[in-house]
Image (cartoon, helix red, strand yellow):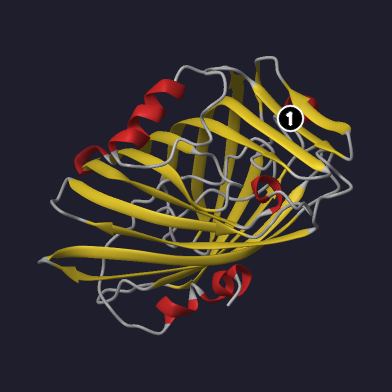
């Protein structure tokens, strides 16, 4: 079965199984590959909407380290550098059946400082460092095709990325005795970022996804899980326009085990089909990335603190390594 077919089937696995109540404290992550983060792939969200009369907001900080070198007879790619993302998120349920939101990303491409630390981390866990034989802590996001340089960023830059507007409509609500939620989420990404600096794509994108969530008991504690799938429609952007695809299926799974009333452990898998026609797996491959981390909840104040490490699972069309920190707040009216 192809990745695209698997993606489409993911939420259907949860809709048919009746279970119990809890929340998925997921990480608001997406594919932050240097050439792919500019598109309108939505960050992971729960199927549960913000409470009526409350505004949910968050600040996410993600450090992404890239180290990829690959050549074919006609194509060449170099992805060496670090990118820092600060994402500001706001969600508000304005009607019983409508939640609206906005995501504002700030993007900084830099030479970075983590190359040696990541190589040591891989050594500790017996992971390969074969892609990290070049100079450490340099910035070079480069792609060429048929001997022509198509795109290169080698100077540090900072600026706003492409702002994303979103809406969500509940299709199934859990009720008093259940925890099942199914929600349709729609988003539009606006071309507010500079495509020359790889802060944006230069075009508007639109995404539509289905999110299904439920829960059960594991070792006497609540275990909540989520499946989601959707389709991302790409506008005619400025990043390798001759090779860009028009439709990208996406999807994944996420789960949180609530070890205590305050602390939870979360793992999530996020997959996407290819964005570009390319023989390079680092640019034209489908991808799956794994995020694992913890969540600490200050329930009385409606605050959750989240931390995750992110690794590529298959394909190199995702960052080699990332660290994610977030603060989420559910505020009063």
Residue occupying image coordinates x 53% and y 76%: 9
Quadrant assignment, res 191: top right
Number of marks present in the image shown? 1
Q: Position of residue 318 (x, y in %)?
A: 57, 45
Q: Eyeballing the image, is 225 above or below 33?
A: below
Residue underneath mark 1: 142
Q: Is residue 14 left or right of residue 274?
A: left
Task: Pick the quarter of the image with the C terminus.
Answer: top left
Q: Is residue 332 visible?
A: no
Please state the horizontal and vertical placement of residue 104, each as a whole percent of the image. Answer: 59, 33
Asked if residue 254 lies left or right of residue 138, the reply is left
Residue 238: horizontal and vertical position, in percent? 84, 38
Label 1 environment density (alpha carbons within 10 Å; few <14, some 14–19, many ≥20): some
In the displayed structure, would residue 211 be above or below residue 286? below
The residue under the point 53% across, 17% down is 137
Toward which corner of the image does residue 18 lie, by quadrant?
bottom left
Residue sitting at x 66%, y 55%: 285
Instruction: Please say if 77 is above or below 225.
Output: above
* Residue 284 visible (yes or no): yes
The N terminus lies in quadrant? bottom right
Q: What secondary structure is found at the residue carrying circle 1?
A: strand
| Residue nearest the viewer, comparing 73 with 230 | 73
């Amino acid at each position: 079965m192809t990745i695209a077919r698997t993606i489409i089937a993911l939420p259907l696995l949860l809709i048919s199984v009746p279970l119990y109540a809890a929340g998925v404290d997921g990480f608001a992550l997406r594919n932050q590959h240097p050439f792919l983060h500019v598109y309108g792939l939505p960050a992971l969200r729960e199927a549960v909407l913000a409470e009526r009369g409350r505004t949910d907001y968050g600040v996410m900080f993600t450090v992404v380290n890239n180290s990829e070198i690959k050549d074919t007879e006609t194509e060449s790619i170099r992805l060496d550098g670090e990118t820092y993302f600060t994402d500001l998120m706001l969600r508000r349920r304005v009607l019983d059946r409508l939640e609206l939101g906005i995501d504002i990303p700030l993007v900084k491409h830099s030479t970075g400082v983590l190359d040696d630390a990541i190589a040591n981390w891989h050594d500790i866990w017996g992971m390969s460092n074969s892609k990290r034989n070049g100079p450490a802590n340099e910035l070079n996001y480069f792609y060429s095709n048929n001997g022509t340089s198509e795109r290169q960023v080698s100077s540090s830059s900072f600026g706003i990325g492409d702002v994303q507007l979103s809406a969500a409509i509940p299709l199934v609500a859990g009720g008093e005795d259940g925890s099942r939620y199914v929600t349709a989420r729609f988003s539009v990404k606006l071309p507010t970022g500079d495509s020359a600096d790889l802060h944006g794509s230069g075009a508007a994108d639109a995404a539509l996804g289905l999110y299904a969530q439920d829960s059960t008991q594991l070792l006497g504690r609540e275990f909540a899980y989520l499946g989601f799938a959707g389709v991302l429609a790409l506008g005619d952007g400025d990043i390798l326009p001759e090779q860009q695809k028009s439709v990208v299926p996406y999807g994944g799974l996420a789960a949180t085990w609530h070890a205590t009333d305050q602390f939870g452990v979360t793992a999530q898998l996020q997959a996407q089909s290819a964005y570009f026609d390319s023989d390079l797996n680092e640019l034209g491959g489908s991808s799956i990335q794994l995020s694992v981390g913890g969540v600490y909840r200050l329930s009385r104040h409606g605050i959750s603190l989240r931390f995750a490490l992110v690794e590529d699972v298959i394909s190199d069309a995702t960052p080699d390594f990332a660290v994610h920190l977030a603060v989420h707040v559910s505020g009063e009216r």
